[in-house]
Amino acid sequence: MHHNLLKPFELKSLVLKNRIVMAPMTRRFSPGGIPGPDVAEYYRRRAAGDVGLIITEGTTIGRPAASNDESIPNFYDPASLDGWRKVVKKVHLAGGKIAPQLWHQGLARPMGSGPVPSAQSEGPSADQTASVAMSDEDIADTIEAFALAAAAAKKIGFDAVELHGAHGYLIDEFFWRGTNRREDAYGGDIVKRSRFATEVIRAVRSAVGPTFPISLRFSQWRIQDYGSKLAETPEQLEQLLAPLVEAGVDLFHASTRRYWEPEFTGSDLNLAGWARKLTGVPTITVGSVGLNGPDFLAGLFGKDDSKVEPATLHALERRLEQGEFDLVAVGRALLADPDWVAKIEQGRFWDVAPFDRSLLKQLV
């Protein structure tokens, strides 16, 4: 029995029955940006399987260039919000808790893609494509779009909200010197480059009130560079994270490819462990939890066609017991088996299904 994973957890208004989180995973199963009954059923099955908290796939805010695919759900159209309302109802009836991940793809969105192909992709600075550097008005409108989406999430009945600040998307692009070459108040050293994120967080906090939990997903790696390091030292990481906590972040979702890998030399702590140590804020760890073999990028991008077999959770349990992090996000294992958590609770680890990349075509 994995006692630490199954302990309850509380954060402001959020009360979870265990420490297991369903990681956000893009699906592209929402034609016209509207999550339908199949999406509601997909999340309901994981809630019924005893996942403590579901974080939805990235769902885009109300900016014309926020999305690269009209089948990615959005979080501003009235029909889409109604679809999400039905998702929340299904998850709650199954005994689960759920938070939407709010997303703007920034410069990662190819020009000419998404529901508004004519919109120019936007970021802190223009890149070599026909993208544009965001004006002060663009920035203000984007901050407002995040806040409006967060307010809608609370009104619909979601239990928390997560901001996607990782993997080379818009919020993350402001963090990086390579993509943020601005010479105004939003550019400069690592603290100044956090200003856009802090203004988004403050606006979201104002929209949802003091007790509604705000999670921020962040990463060192980007889709464009898996070996990148936003912060080379713990001191730099603290400089980045401290303003985000002051702005109102309640929970850091530290995205890594393998949760067991140390983030800095001289310590066994992973990225979530360092974030917790430096800020005192609860953290979520993630990265190949419960799986042996190739990491998730190999499976998602077709670099490996073999099945990825389940792995034991003993090392994860020890780190959780030691207080390195507070919650554990699980991705592919929950795609492969909606009842993964229930089987762990029942000691049926031998019955857990392996992950096969063909599952990505089904995602039910």
Image (spheres, helix red, strand yellow):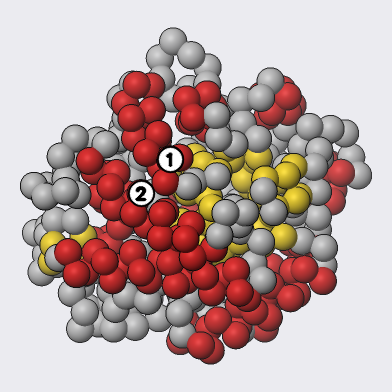
Residue 87 is left or right of residue 216, and the answer is right
Type of the residue with mark 2: Thr
Q: Which residue is mark 2?
A: 198
Q: Residue at x 55, y 44 (%)?
A: 250
Q: Residue at x 70, y 35 (%)?
A: 311
Secondary structure of the residue carrying numbered label 2: helix
Q: Position of residue 36 (x, y in %)?
A: 61, 84
Whether residue 38 is visible: no
Q: Quadrant of residue 210?
A: bottom right
Q: CA distance from mark 1 to mark 2?
A: 8 Å
Q: Residue at x 48, y 14 (%)?
A: 267
Residue 287 is left or right of residue 74, and the answer is right
Residue 246's mark? 1
| Furthest residue toward right | 346
Q: Residue at x 37, y 76 (%)?
A: 62
Residue 97's mark? none
Whether residue 237 is visible: yes
Residue 63 is left or right of residue 329, and the answer is left
